[in-house]
Amino acid sequence: MHLILVLYLSLLGSISKAEILGKVELAAVGNEILLSNFSNQSIPNKSPFNVTTSTELKPFDRLEINIQTLTESEKDKELLLYVSKDMLSGLSALPLADQEVGDITVLYEQGDYYAVRECFFDVYKWVDGNWKNLYTYDNKGYNCASRFFFRQGKLHSIGGRGFWEAHSNLLIFDEQLGSWDRVNIKGQPSDVYSEYTGVTEKSLFYFFPADYYGKRYDLIYWLDFNSNTWRKFDFSSLITFQKKPQVPFHADISNKSLFDSKDYMVLQVYEASTSGAGLFLLDMQTFSFRWLKNQAVESKWKKYKWKIIHNNNIFLRNFAQELRSIDLDEIFNEAIPLEKPKELPLIAEEEKPTQSIWRWSILAFFLGIGVNQLVLYFRHKNDSHSSVNPKKEAPIHQAQHQNIESQINRLLSQRGKLLTKDELDTILQLRNQQNLDSLKVLRSRALKIINQQALKVYGQNLVSRERDEYDKRVMLYRINDQIKTNEKFLISSEVE
């Protein structure tokens, strides 16, 4: 009996504390990360997924959830420890989930939940059991591959790639106005973005920035929030994306083999001398670098149903329904220190050939417009000296009045009503305008002309603007019910 007890205790001693707590262990074969699988063993009391009867949700920093798995994730008991079933079902109904590719990011900030997604400026906040969009405009496509984060209680977005350019602009969201504002930063890198971004309360880091066409640079950009200044470091002597043979490590950032947390950024890299896989770690608080040999991200973990980041812990569920946790503090403590990259001076960025071509093209375009205007000016001057019959322009003049007359008559039929922006655009027949800026300009011009004509005939404006009493950020349009017409067209009475 004593012998059996001794053997049992010796077996327990062979299981390390790190394995029980979910630490990453070295793989014996294939250089793959082995993580604690809570679905195959009992859940220890210290586990972040320890089942509890409490209805209070656990805090976290960031949740990234695959859009295709939103519905089935509503039944994931481990995920439901952090977000409610109503939140998940509500996400499925948002425009953010219309495109069934990519992730939705849920941010937890001081008891509030926010849902965002790259390529969208929409900011949804969980309010009274529903996701409410705080963004009051309709812009998209400027911030693909951007990173959202909270700092000092405010939502930020860094960088991205749009339809025409890549950028590293820092934006801050104003919840009161429902708009994004750009922050002016010294030494901002031009025409580059990075999907590999780490953020702390004091700093932000850009790994391997890329231009609009996908060319990557062996650089690290470091944004110091305290001084609002960017710093630049040459990474090429330590790690290269270009796979230069003389550089110790080659980066592998396909499939986003990266983890980032409160203090760390982790990249999968390969040692040039042995081609062995390992992990490259940056402590963002101290700007110190380390290397952990014989490690790699197992392929089945490069895609996940959801990933939760809380402090320096990463929790994942993959498509094989396996659950994993990673403690980045323990990984960093086991890694070997590396030298720091060389800092480069902040000088004006060299103009890229593509930028030069674009600038000269734009200059030539406006120059062409200027020449065309000069030609039209002199032609008009010659025509006036030649006493051209002005009746030739009458059909155009008449058509313009007919269009305005039609708009005003439709507005008169809505007298006393309070119209939304979309309802007004429909009446003015402006909804076929795809460009939002053009739509705003056309709406403003139309209202100006309409009110000018109304003042001429009736001595008062036909349309006035006022704010929605329930949401002061929304503008509504009041159609004057004091105007009386005697079956007479407003504009036709003015056309001779």
Image: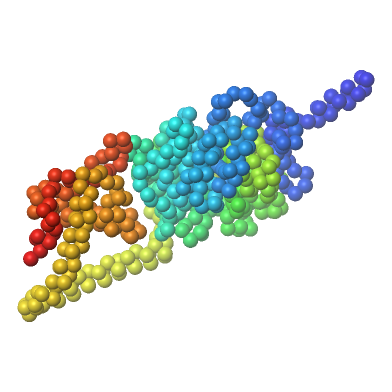
Whole-percent x and y of residue 477? 24, 45
Q: Residue furthest top?
A: 2
**Could you say which is closer to the camera, residue 135 or residue 230?**
135
Q: In the rendered view, would you say 457 is above or below 51?
A: below
On the rendered image, what quadrant is the N terminus found in? top right
Whole-percent x and y of residue 357? 38, 67
Residue positioned 42% across, 64% down in the render: 354
Side of 86 where 268 appears, left or right: right
Residue positioned 41% across, 35% down in the render: 154
Residue positioned 55% across, 25% down in the render: 56
Q: In the rendered view, would you say 364 is above or below 46?
A: below
- Tell me which corner region of the image, top left, top right, bottom left or bottom right, holds residue 7: top right
- Residue 316 visible in this rendered orientation of the protein: yes
**Number of marks:** 0
Side of 346 where 83 appears, left or right: right
Q: In the rendered view, would you say 125 is above or below 295?
A: above
**Could you say which is closer to the camera, residue 26 or residue 370?**
370
- Residue 310 visible in this rendered orientation of the protein: no
Whole-percent x and y of residue 79? 60, 35
Side of 248 where 159 appears, left or right: left
Q: Residue furthest bottom?
A: 386
Q: In the rendered view, would you say 408 is above or below 84?
A: below
On the rendered image, what quadrant is the C terminus found in? bottom left
**Could you say which is closer to the camera, residue 213 or residue 164?**
164
How is this picture coloured?
rainbow
Whole-percent x and y of residue 334? 67, 36
Residue positioned 18% across, 67% down in the render: 399
